[in-house]
Each structure stands twice: as structure tokens, then as C-alpha cells.
Amino acid sequence: MIDWLIFNAGVAEVTSLNWITLTHQIITDPVLFCTVPNYLTERVGSMSEDGIGHIFQANVFGHYYIVSLPSIILIEQLKRLTSLLTERSKVLWSVSLETALAFIYDPNDPTGIRSHHAYGSSKRFIELLHCYLATHPRTPMYFITHPGITDSGVVSPYQFPIREAIQHLKKVAFYVARWCGSPWHSISGYNGACSVIYCAVKAGREDEMMKWGSGSDRWGRERLLGTTLQGEAELWKEESRAAFELVERMYQEQIFKLNVQQASTSPDGNGIGNGKKY
């Protein structure tokens, strides 16, 4: 049995910073400047070898593919009689605060190939997919989490020494935002893991329709922050279904390409990736 499948943030292809937009945001809203930045320039049109948007495949489809495979291939290889993903199993997706931006996701470009915000678009897609999976019959439990704002090297568009200078300035800005009252600046990886640990160890099915985020108080003590998804799931019902149908169709296409038997129903007849439509 698989107890937890925990998927990390994935990748982002930030090529540079838009210094004009950066200057405007830091003057008009300094806390938002280092919480939900709108000045990151991302690569547009990046594709994987499979002909899928690079960011979408790394952050969304690759994870969905992994979730769908255990009860298909591994059972046959290990000769197990029960699904590796059971009712006690937990699948944890990683999203972002960027999904709050209205322009971050275009339903006409769900895989973000034409998007100037491919990373945020992929995270919004995960939320839509989660809203569908968590409100339909399935075997594992699903949770979405985010680490808040942590000090990492995910966004490092420049080379030494500019990159290091930006990293140090960014960290200082994070502490200033925390001292100004921002609840989302967890900063350390330890604090950032709070939401993931909670969902993995303590959360139950009643917690699935929450977006669990990590944060901290002014003194750096970790905080668990939850935002309900109930209203969002109802509002974006059709978009959520479209998100599921897209990744399910992509999954079936990849299975076909890899010449894996289409008889992919798990022994208990539940779960995703079994070719069934909800």
C-alpha cells in the first residue's frame, strides 16, 4: 500500500525580471511585491519531448500520470491482489498563492503553452483538477497544499553575481513583509513544510475541500492556514470537469503510445487513470 504520494512544486522557467513592473509594484504595494509578484518574465512556448507544454508536464501531467500508474503496472509486476492506492492513501498536490491572480489561467490555453505565466497557470490547473477529483467517487484522498513564501532558488534568472545579490535582497524583503504582518512568509523550508505534514499525518476526507497553506507569525513561528474551496468548486464546476477530461485523455494517449494494455482498471474498480468517466 502507498500511504502518501507527495508532489513538489515542480519547475518554473523564469528568464528575467521586468524591472519597470517590479519598481511599480514595490512602490504601490510592497507586501504584494514579495508575495504575489507580477514582474517575472517566463519563457513562452516551451515544449517537452512528448509534445506537451514543458511546465504543464512537469508540474501537472507528470504527477497525474504517476497517480494513475500504480494500480495498473505495479500490481501486475508485483503480483499484488489489491490496489496500491487505497482509501487510506493520500495524494498531495502542491499549488501556489499565484493562483489568486485573475489573469493567471486561460481556459482556452489550459496547458499554458501560450501563457506568459506558465507556472501559475499550471498551479491553477491543479486546483481545478483537485476540485473535480475531490467531489467525485475515488479511492485515495486528495489534498492541495502550498508552502507559503519560502526562500528558495526556484526563481534564479540571472548568473553570478547578480543572482546571489537578488537572492539576498529577496530574503530581506521577505522578512520585512513578515514584520509588516504578512501571514504567508514562512521563509524557511521547515515552516513551509507545515501544510504538507499536516495533510500527510492528520487531515482526513473532511479536509479535502480546503487549500492548506503554510505561514508564520512575526516571530517566525509556523502557522497552518486553510482556505475553503467549496464555493470555488461550485463556481468552476465545468472548468474542473474540463481539466479532468483533458489530463485523462492525455493519459490514455500516453498509455497507448507506450503500448501499455488498455485494460487498466484497478481491482477495486475505483481511482483515476482507469479509463472511467465520472
Image (cartoon, rainbow, N blue to C red):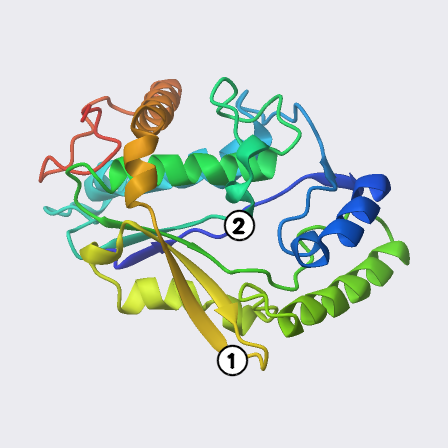
Q: Which residue is mark 2?
A: 97
Q: Amino acid at mark 2?
A: Leu
Residue pictured at 42% horizontal, 39% vertical: 126
Q: Quadrant of residue 90?
A: bottom left
Q: Quadrant of residue 173?
A: bottom right
* Residue 65 visible in the current orientation: no
Residue pictured at 34% horizontal, 39% vertical: 232
Q: In this rendered view, identify the residue nearer to me: 249 or 255.
A: 249
Residue pictured at 71% horizontal, 53% vertical: 29
Q: Is residue 49 left or right of residue 132?
A: right
Q: Amino acid at mark 1?
A: Arg
Disc 2 to disc 1, how far (Cα)? 20 Å
Q: Is residue 234 left or right of residue 156?
A: left
Q: Quadrant of residue 71?
A: top left
Please, what secondary structure does the residue beneath circle 2 have? helix
Q: In this rendered view, identify the residue nearer to me: 112 or 90.
A: 112
